[in-house]
Amino acid sequence: MAEQYYEGIGRRKASTARVRVMSGTGEFFINERPLEAYFPRLGDVQTIVGPLEMIGQRGSLDVSVLVQGGGVTGQADAVQLGLARALVVMNPDAKPALRKGGYLTRDAREKERKKPGLKRARKAPTYTKR
């Protein structure tokens, strides 16, 4: 029989992460690869495990993540939000601490669309008088 797990969905930019948290030994897998192998940058690892360290559960929970879309930073932030939401489902008493740490706030900034006549969303072609 499968072990009981708690799930949270996180999104950031074009990335979506489905995070499952269960009691265990502290293993952390993202797309079936270890955390440090999937996110080699140290800052990304610190960002992701922030919610676990906030509630003091870093080595006592197993985390399994399926993440897709976007780039490295968007995926890291999506995993962080999904992890925080899963921890709240698992332990509602942790919600005030995670809220205070800013881990439950969805960063709603998305890429702005390109406008006609411009080079990018806002950059206009160089003006020439003659």
Image (cartoon, rainbow, N blue to C red):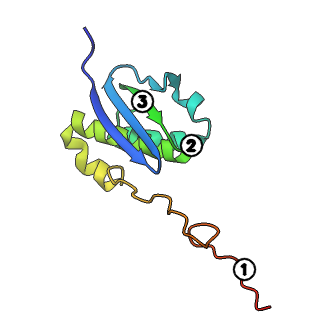
* Residue 48 point in image, percent of width and height: 46, 41
Secondary structure, mark 2, is helix
Asked if marks 2 and 1 touch (Cβ < 8 Å), the reply is: no
Which residue is painted at 44% across and 39% down in the image? Answer: 49
Which residue is painted at 33% across and 28% down in the image? Answer: 21
Asked whether residue 13 appears in the rendered view, the answer is: yes
Answer above or below: position of 127 versus 49: below
* Residue 53 point in image, percent of width and height: 40, 40
Which residue is painted at 34% across and 28% down in the image? Answer: 20
Q: Callout 2: 10 Å neighbours few (<14), some, many (20+)?
A: some
Q: Quadrant of residue 81?
A: top left
In this figure, which residue is indicated by the disc labeled 2? 72
Horizontally, residue 129 falls left or right of residue 72, namely right
In this figure, which residue is indicated by the disc labeled 3? 65
Asked if marks 3 and 1 touch (Cβ < 8 Å), the reply is: no
Amino acid at dot 2: Val
Of the image marks 2 and 1, the number of the one nearer the N terminus: 2
Answer above or below: position of 21 versus 112: above
Most distant residue in the right direction: 130
In this figure, which residue is indicated by the disc labeled 1? 126
Q: Quadrant of the C terminus?
A: bottom right
Of the image marks 3 and 2, the number of the one nearer the N terminus: 3
